[in-house]
Amino acid sequence: MVVNNTKANTPPPPAAAMGTEHHRAINMPAMGVERHKVSAPERRTTCQALRQRLAEVFFPDDPLHRFKNQPPAKKLVLALQYFFPIFDWGSQYSLRLLRSDAVAGLTIASLAIPQGISYAKLANLPPIIGLYSSFVPPLIYALLGSSRDLAVGPVSIASLVMGSMLREAVAPEQQPIVYLQLAFTATFFAGLFQASLGFLRLGFMVDFLSKATLTGFMGGAAVIVSLQQLKGLLGIVHFTTHMGFVDVMASVVKRHAEWEWQTIVMGVAFLAVLLGTRQISARNPRLFWVSAAAPLSSVIISTVISYLCRGHAISIIGDLPRGVNPPSMNMLAFSGPFVALSIKTGIMTGILSLTEGIAVGRTFASINNYAVDGNKEMMAIGVMNMAGSCASCYVTTGSFSRSAVNYSAGCKTAVSNIVMAAAVLVTLLFLMPLFHYTPNVILSAIIITAVVGLIDVRGAARLWKVDKLDFLACLAAFLGVLLVSVQVGLALAVGISLFKVLLQVTRPNTVVMGRIPGTQSFRNMAQYKDAVKVPSFLVVGVESAIYFANSTYLVERIMRYLREEEEGGQGVKCVVLDMGAVAAIDTSGLDALAELKRVLDKRGVELVLANPVASVTERMYSSVVGDAFGSDRIFFSVAEAVAAAPHKTTMP
Amino acid sequence: MVVNNTKANTPPPPAAAMGTEHHRAINMPAMGVERHKVSAPERRTTCQALRQRLAEVFFPDDPLHRFKNQPPAKKLVLALQYFFPIFDWGSQYSLRLLRSDAVAGLTIASLAIPQGISYAKLANLPPIIGLYSSFVPPLIYALLGSSRDLAVGPVSIASLVMGSMLREAVAPEQQPIVYLQLAFTATFFAGLFQASLGFLRLGFMVDFLSKATLTGFMGGAAVIVSLQQLKGLLGIVHFTTHMGFVDVMASVVKRHAEWEWQTIVMGVAFLAVLLGTRQISARNPRLFWVSAAAPLSSVIISTVISYLCRGHAISIIGDLPRGVNPPSMNMLAFSGPFVALSIKTGIMTGILSLTEGIAVGRTFASINNYAVDGNKEMMAIGVMNMAGSCASCYVTTGSFSRSAVNYSAGCKTAVSNIVMAAAVLVTLLFLMPLFHYTPNVILSAIIITAVVGLIDVRGAARLWKVDKLDFLACLAAFLGVLLVSVQVGLALAVGISLFKVLLQVTRPNTVVMGRIPGTQSFRNMAQYKDAVKVPSFLVVGVESAIYFANSTYLVERIMRYLREEEEGGQGVKCVVLDMGAVAAIDTSGLDALAELKRVLDKRGVELVLANPVASVTERMYSSVVGDAFGSDRIFFSVAEAVAAAPHKTTMP
């Protein structure tokens, strides 16, 4: 056991533990109390400080740590493995792994094909684009991506947002080619934006979409998407192109003459089957294949029925071109009237698809206990979309639902994406004519089944229980999407998220603290009922960095505590600020402290500080404020401050 | 002395203090250690919680506390005094106070008249508007304002911004009436915006302009304004209307043929005198009247010279209309092509003038030890500007330089503003013809002298010393104004301020902590060199609220600490998170904690939490995360966590 010879700076020992010792603390000469020095961290040069700060902002994960102390040849291999993870796991790839991956790949292909066709329709694009998008991007992701479980392809939310944003400028029915150009260009910008975020290591910007607002936004979008499917489900031909809840419901009612009973019967029947299989898989995860196989089975069965009843009113997909993705580089339009819209749409869909892709990657990485590098993933997804935009693909990312199936089906590596792409290739080359008679109603049923999972009622209930403000944000985003528009909903989601952060910054918590009997610890009196106030002291804990944005508030708040204390008949002779939770202070904050000291001095009240953290101590000592307080007014802990302060009378 | 009978929950006492007692702590059965319970605050209903939260956001100063427990009649009087502070101090007003106020009022009038004329020219407005603006607004402020020292009138920065923003749409030389309409309308919107901020108690929005960026912005604006005065100072007739540094310097050089030696001699001479008197007053505050009297004296002397030398080339103000403010309500344009510009200009100048006015009010209130209610002041300034816009005034606020003179001259109440307004009234009614021969060059000299004080080199140096990021923000705002435009500079200032806040939120400090020998305290090991690491424990302090915006980062950062620790050959069996500085946690943060626990569990590392604050404890206990940790993994302090954790081996 190490007994330190630090008797000199021993603090007053806890009161209840030792009766006689306690007297010593009380009777100690007030200003001469032995105490610990509050040290500042080692001085760094400006350059060092700045470099450390930037490293923390841009390289918090220290991505180069694996390159440390390695010979150059090894470094090259590591770099190659870093940029192309396939070289990392590829060398250990085995037949056993391939078998697992093949099963998983075929399973997600059976899901990806009907979903691809459906989601393309959600984006007002020809169905074939959805299949193209399920072929090239998965191959590129298999090369670049670091997630083993991500199943890549089109997703519902990004498709919906792209569709609704582009439709505002160009009607896809009247100008299909212009619309297609716009979609590819937006996809290119989405990829460029995603890759830049990753390359510039600004991945943390994605974190600004809080989970709460995303829950609301996704729920609202899911409802909107489902309502849109009423067109297909009811067989309505002339449907509103607006997205709002009111418009859609009005259109449904107004066009009741167009409702078709055959379509409705088929739609409701298959929807019931699809939702039923979803329930089965949800209750018993081992039966995941039931819901995974359901969409393709439904497509096949409904196509057969539709073929047998051909000539009837049920609307069908019709002819689809055969063959692999045609190049579409010549369709990217970097000038002309719609460039601004393309960029805007690209950024919006880029952020949304990135958020989904990164979240999915992280979720499954943490389940399987491997690491996914966020910035690296962003580059992979970005490059995938840029390449996709040149090969007739629209925005793709890792889909939550298909990745879950991929994982359940036992995928081991990104090879499952390659298998899926191969299956899609076979479909594109040989099976396209089979989809001719596929009824549109089945696509609507598939979309509804897919997006219903995005409505997270339990998550919203949990928000309500834990954090009312988060719930309000969620609700606002939900209603914004539902009643106004997808963009307004998204803007609300981001705006509320930012506002919440700023609110927390401008109105930080402050607490009045008391001593916990029998300890040297001071704690929030509202939290610990047994905490005892020290007479003639006001101990205030500030639970936030002190900035320009809250320094005025903090001074006012502390003065109010003092006023309330004095109105309560308690004379205060010393205010102790517990700075333990003040993570940082800026120049305005320092000025505010000096100001507070000056005001309190005029009232004959002492102001002392306790337990400043490293960065705050450093700043205090390097500014005039530190001089104003002097080291005899800055204490190691609240207990020492209370013990040493000149106005001390009695202790509890 | 109160000796608590809390022996049952006494913590392990400090090590160095008592040798034998220490053994007891070590030999204690690990899981059965006596410890303090972490309590959550009392449960509140949703309504109570929300009300408390909103009260803290909008009424942090508890403005109604003075109305508590008062009879209704008294309440009415108090309300009247609240809205019209003149009723508060008016009843105690005395002749002695009037004498002081009269001296101060006349002193600031001698400053306000030449500055009013000069600043109006800065906003491209007729000089007379500057005098009008020094008459009506001070009277209204005297009724409504709560500051005793504020000297109200036009100010340089707001004049500059209004001039440069409006000139972009309308040339004041070609369309003087339209320009005037725009200026009055913008003033109205500025007032409306200011009053609304105050009424909605959103005054804290003003705090988002950090002092650092304001220093840069003001410095840049001062340089720009000074450069613009080269036109008057050199006697150039055809000067650029652009504001940028490059344009102005190019224009000065290109137009050297227009330079006039008489103007230059007069300008340089008076500028030297004005700057000299400024120095004298700065060195000896008791001689404040030297610099206060200098502008008016310069105007009088230069006018006499100019009259004597009439017919020479020196450019003069010319005829000014006599009489009080004409009504201008009919000139407010709430429709037409320029409404958007008026609103934008109004908001910009509104924010800037509010920032100056509030800062001035607070500064002098704190010197004289009285309180100024920020939201109330905003309403006063807003109403003053709305009224002003109907009486031929443009944007006004409390001027820093004139308020300082007001204070030095011994003003006691807002009556000094009334005296000043009376002096301006006399000038408007009888003395206007005297300004006919006032040379424009003297106005330029007065403006330069006034704005030079805004260049705060010492403040910038202090920023560099204390906070490099603040300095960068300051420099960016300065260069933005100087090289691009006033608006870009302002946008940069606000943008950088916000970015800094967000950066702090996304990349909070985390520190590795060790025990300070001889205490129960754990502190940052980088700050306290004598802190000792507890073997097989990793104690990490998180110095920030845990939000959606930083939860991913924090998990990654803690995992990196663990990796570094293990690579350093130190086995870690338990991670202790010191939550004392975590002021809040949201649902994403809770999820992140659960996630971290899961990942660490897989590695066989224990995760325990220490000292959560009230709001965090409340949330933990009301969510599944609390259940995951259970109360036996949440500790009162780091010391207790280390003492109780099952993997404890030895202690330092």
Image: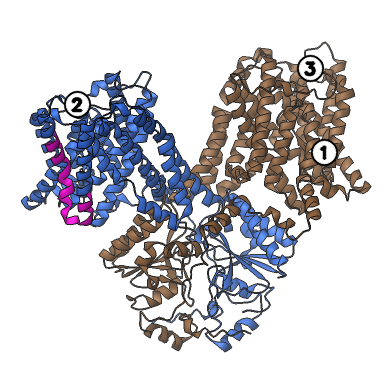
Chain colours: A brown, B blue
Compared with B399, B557 (above or below) is below
- Which of the two discs, 2 and 1, sits closer to the camera? 2
Q: Residue furthest left?
A: B95
- Which of the two discs, 3 and 2, sits closer to the camera? 2
Looking at marks 1 and 3 on the same chain, the residue that comes earlier in the sequence is marked by 3
Compared with B416, A545 (above or below) is below
For marks 1 and 3, give the CA distance: 29 Å
Residue B294 magenta: yes
Residue B495 picture location, percent across and down: 47, 41
Q: Which residue is mark 2?
A: B313
- Disc 2 residue type? Ala
- Disc 3 residue type? Ile
Q: Which residue is mark 3?
A: A316
- Which of the two discs, 1 and 3, sits closer to the camera? 1
Residue B180 picture location, percent across and down: 27, 23
Q: Residues within 10 Å of mark 2 (few under 14, many from 20)?
A: few
Q: Nearer the viewer, residue A261 or B64?
A: B64
